[in-house]
Image (spheres, rainbow, N blue to C red):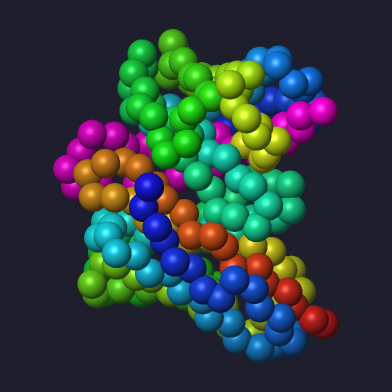
Amino acid sequence: DGGITQSPKYLFRKEGQNVTLSCEQNLNHDAMYWYRQDPGQGLRLIYYSQIVNDFQKGDIAEGYSVSREKKESFPLTVTSAQKNPTAFYLCASSPRTGTIFSGANVLTFGAGSRLTVL
Amino acid sequence: GQQLNQSPQSMFIQEGEDVSMNCTSSSIFNTWLWYKQDPGEGPVLLIALYKAGELTSNGRLTAQFGTTRKDSFLNISASIPSDVGIYFCAGELYNFNKFYFGSGTKLNVKP
């Protein structure tokens, strides 16, 4: 079945450590996204990528980094510069990019990764 | 970032009642999406809307794309206990392939 796989599901980090969250999709989607979710809040965009080897900052990119070396993969690194990293992280993908009339676009999500800083 | 105002924040209803929630924005969107999220899981797509004025149903769920392209609503008819969860709206900015989310409506259904 096609979908998005995020790993690990749960991750614990000590302060000062970098951690990397994995996101893999087999939907053949062009665009991939990382969102952060805090309790009682909506999803906030961290980074997104519309094509391999290219990505753009979202609204809360500080303290995070990404790479897009393969179409299927979009890992997120939470660096020690992120002051409040404890959150639920969601990876998503969408099939269409760069079109003026981008009707019929849709976001598909993974199951999420919960990061806790000890 | 873009602000999507979603209301109400939470609802407590009796099984069998109808539910209505909505999202508004100061920006024009070319896509509106409605998702349901269970605790500890990723959001699951319920309904997608792509044209102003479009009215789409998915079983007991009905959603509409506002004619101004700045709002959308979701109705759930005859609610059942498994409708419990958090419902999010999401809008895609025209030509930017970026999606912005409302803060969610937490639905509680009492049997």
Foreground residue, B2 or B23?
Answer: B2
- Where does the N terminus of chain A fall, quadrant-wise? top right
Is A83 included in the stretch rendered in magenta? Answer: no
Foreground residue, B84 or A59?
Answer: A59
Q: Residue farthest to the top? A: A69
Image: B64 above or below A2: below
Q: Residue at x 53, y 39 (%)?
A: A35
Q: Which residues are magenta?
A: A90-118
Residue B8 occupies quadrant: bottom right
Is A91 included in the stretch rendered in magenta? Answer: yes
**Mark count:** 0
Q: Residue farthest to the left? A: A100
Question: Residue B43 in the image: x percent, y percent?
Answer: 59, 50
Q: Residue at x 17, y 43 (%)?
A: A100
Q: Residue at x 74, y 87 (%)?
A: B14
- Where does the C terminus of chain A fall, quadrant-wise? top right
Image: A37 above or below A70: below
| Residue A45 in sight in this render | yes
Question: Residue A15 in the image: x percent, y percent?
Answer: 74, 21
Question: Residue A78 in the image: x percent, y percent?
Answer: 60, 22
Image: B92 above or below B32: above
| Residue B47 in sight in this render | no
Foreground residue, B56 or B70?
Answer: B70
Q: Residue at x 73, y 74 (%)?
A: B108
Question: Residue A60 in the image: x percent, y percent?
Answer: 47, 36
